[in-house]
Image (spheres, rainbow, N blue to C red):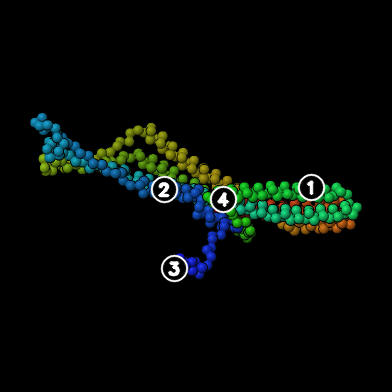
Amino acid sequence: MRPLILALLAAVLAGPVRADPLPGASVDSLLAAARQASPELRMARLEAEAAAERVLPAGALPDPMVRLELENITRNGSRSPTLAPGQVGDTQYTLIQPLPYWGKRDLKREQAAAEAEAARGQAGDTWLALATRIKLLHAQRWQTHQALDLTRQNLDLTARLARIAQARYAGGLAPQQDAIRAQVERTNLEAELLAMESERHHQMAYLNTLLARPADAPLAEPTVLRPEPEPARLDPAALAGRLAERNPLLATEAALLTAAEKGRDLTYRNRYPDFTVGVSPMQVGSRVDAWNLMLEMNIPLQQNSRQSQEREAERRVEAAQARREALGHRLVGEVSAALAELEAARATATLTATRLLPQAELGFKAALAGYETGQVDFATLLEAQKQIRNARLALLRAQTARQIRLAEIERLIGEDL
């Protein structure tokens, strides 16, 4: 009983157990969870580690071989056959070591190292692709969350307008159609709320799958967007330089080009023979009374076959060069397009926040005052309300579009801005 009391006392003194906060409030929390749990990322890293383990064996010498030869196992027919080395006519032990031509092992090792570097580039691109999807989903979840709050506010405002319309109808100042139209608008907003809730559920489920969590696992509500970089960090020339240095796909293609070049050089080295050396002690009875040395080499006579292999290796190098060049041009073009779209989203957000939204709010206030005095009909009032809501939704879409474009740029340059 006493140990139980002591354990309870220790638990009370230690205070409540703190559970880890749910991911989802910010992009950083989601990215941290993905780094720890994503099986896709773990697979890419393990494949890169497996490729790195191929470098050492690629440059190693082939395993030596041992040959045992028993000669005259019947002693010229004077006895029954035997496999005992000391009882046959003579026994020859041969140790054989293949030796590739000078430089071939180094080329194989360098080729394997380049392929391992390409695998690391693929792992880096896997992480960037995963991080980009998470950033996009976070921005979309934030937009949906904000749109839900905005729609609920509009629902409350519509309920207020419905009460005004009902009061004016009861006083004979407005037709019954106004009250009915207000109820129809409320129903439409409630339907939109249901659609947004469904969209939010889909976004949560997809995001959970990226984090290797159950689809219905809870996530914190998105509260903040990622801070946007200073305009100076979005200079096209600077971004092009960072892309050339940090983009993992370009690094992968550069490594594959190196591997193709090493493979080409190795193919040209096949013009020269490989060797095999061996040493053979010979046993007669219980003693070794002779030693033999052996040197063997292949003769590269198949000129047509080798020349075809050399042409193939050259074409592979040229194809790798063209592929890397084409990828570089495509990525620079995508950065330029993303920058243009980012600037358009920024201009749209500024225009909406500074001009469109204030104008819509002034129009709604004027329409509400006019309706209460009988100078404006109810349809005009509802239209003014919709203009405010549409302006706020347009601002949300522009802010989300900026986050999406920034995420795309970060994937292209291979690092955060």
* Label 1 neighbour load within 10 Å: few <14, some 14-19, many 20+: some
Which amino acid is tagged 3?
Arg
CA–CA distance in space, label 4 to label 1: 36 Å
* Label 2 neighbour load within 10 Å: few <14, some 14-19, many 20+: few
Badge 1 element = helix
> What residue is pinned by disc 4?
208
The answer to whether one can see residue 398 in this image is no
CA–CA distance in space, label 2 to label 4: 28 Å
Upstream in sequence: badge 1 or badge 3 = 3
Upstream in sequence: badge 3 or badge 4 = 3
In this view, the mark in front (1 or 2):
1
Upstream in sequence: badge 2 or badge 4 = 2
Q: Residues at badges 1 and 3 in contact (C-beta under 8 Å)?
A: no
* Label 3 neighbour load within 10 Å: few <14, some 14-19, many 20+: few
> What residue is pinned by disc 2?
50
In this view, the mark in front (2 or 4):
4
CA–CA distance in space, label 2 to label 3: 54 Å
In this view, the mark in front (3 or 4):
3
In this view, the mark in front (2 or 3):
3
Quarter occupied by the C terminus = bottom right
Q: Residue at x 60, y 56 (%)?
A: 220
| Percent x, y of residue 398 | 69, 53
Badge 2 element = helix
Upstream in sequence: badge 4 or badge 1 = 1
| Percent x, y of residue 308 | 41, 34
Which mark is on residue 5? none
Which amino acid is tagged 4?
Asn
> What residue is pinned by disc 3?
2
| Percent x, y of residue 169 | 87, 52
* Label 4 neighbour load within 10 Å: few <14, some 14-19, many 20+: many
Q: Quadrant of residue 164?
A: bottom right
